[in-house]
Amino acid sequence: MIVIMLGAPASGKGTQSVIVAQRLKVPHISTGDIFRWNIANNTAVGEEAKKYIDKGILVPDELTIRILKERIEKEDCERGFVLDGFPRTINQQQSLDRMLTECNKSINMAINLSVTDDEVIRRISGRRMCKCGKAYHIVTYPPKTPGICDLCNGELYTRKDDTVEVANTRLEAYKLQTEPILAVYRERGIVVDIDGHKPQEQVAEDVWKEILKYSEKHGWM
Ligand code: AMP
């Protein structure tokens, strides 16, 4: 089961792909998380990626494809995985196809979480993160105790690339470089569109319903 989660920055990709991965019992793979781990651990990959991430532009394909390949070759990906934030360019999409074809696999489904540009900016400017991966919004989805994660009591922080200025650059990168991927997947008939404006729990249910519908039709799971 290989599921790709597509959508603009802050469309809910991270939150929803964690839920889908848990339900499907396969790994959740976020290239953004892999880069952030590398930055926090001062690796050479982190040092290189940081130059781009802080500005809101995409990390070059060569590096991104390499870290993704290393991750999906691990044994826990045998049964499938949920991809969050990859592919983001046509080049990455084609490389992923080649990697999967080599091991006789293919993408089962691409979920497109759609939100308006205004909503992207509103979400990014109020987003607070926890190290455990849980995301909050200071107005629409606040933690029970301000600044503290409901799940693990961790201290919440603001991502360095979650400023309005950087958000606009990220949105532009999404439209120019990532949106064309949707057209490719649409042609294959594997895209499911989900309204990402609804509350998180409702979006999760809508996504799951579509996955069940799709699985029944294609006989997987
Ligand atoms: P995300 O956590 O998915 O919003 O990613 C945060 C940042 O990491 C992006 O704005 C990019 O700079 C970088 N990044 C993550 N995934 C990719 C990718 N597939 N290709 C290029 N850059 C990426």
Image: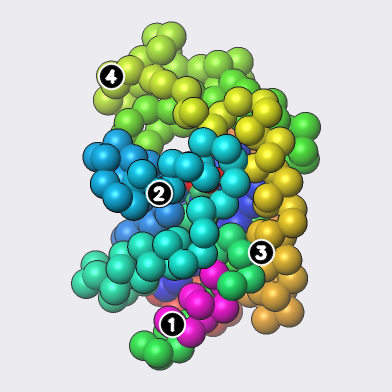
Q: Earlier in the sequence, mark 4 or mark 3?
A: 4
Q: Secondary structure at mark 3?
A: strand
Residue contact between numbered discs 1 and 4, judged by CB atoms under 8 Å: no
Vertical placement of 178 versus 44: above or below?
below
Magenta stretch holds residue 67: no
Q: Which residue is mark 4?
A: 153
Q: Which residues are magenta?
A: 92-100
Q: Residues within 10 Å of mark 1 (few under 14, many from 20)?
A: some
Assess disc 2: are there few (<14), some (14-19) or many (≥20) residues with their C-alpha within 10 Å of its C-alpha.
Answer: some
Q: Is residue 121 visible?
A: yes
Q: Nearer the viewer, residue 116 or 196?
A: 116
Q: Quadrant of residue 145?
A: top left
N-terminal-most mark, 4 or 2: 2
| Residue topped by disc 2 | 48
Q: Nearer the viewer, mark 1 or mark 4?
A: 1
Q: Is residue 138 above or below residue 219?
A: above
Res. 9 in view: no
> How far apart are the two marked residues, 4 and 3, measured between alpha carbons?
35 Å
Mark nearest the camera among 2 and 1 is 2
Determine the CA span between mark 1 and mark 3. Answer: 21 Å
Few, some or many residues within 10 Å of mark 4 (<14, 14–19, 20+) = few
Which comes before the other along the chain, label 1 or label 3?
Answer: 1
Residue identifier under label 3: 192
The reply, left or right, for residue 17 in relation to residue 28 is right
Image quarter in which the N terminus is found: bottom left
In this view, the mark in front (4 or 3): 4
- Image quadrant of residue 133? top left
What is the magenta segment's predominant secondary structure?
helix
| Residue identified by numbered label 1 | 100
Badge 4 amino acid: Asn
Q: Nearer the viewer, mark 3 or mark 2?
A: 2
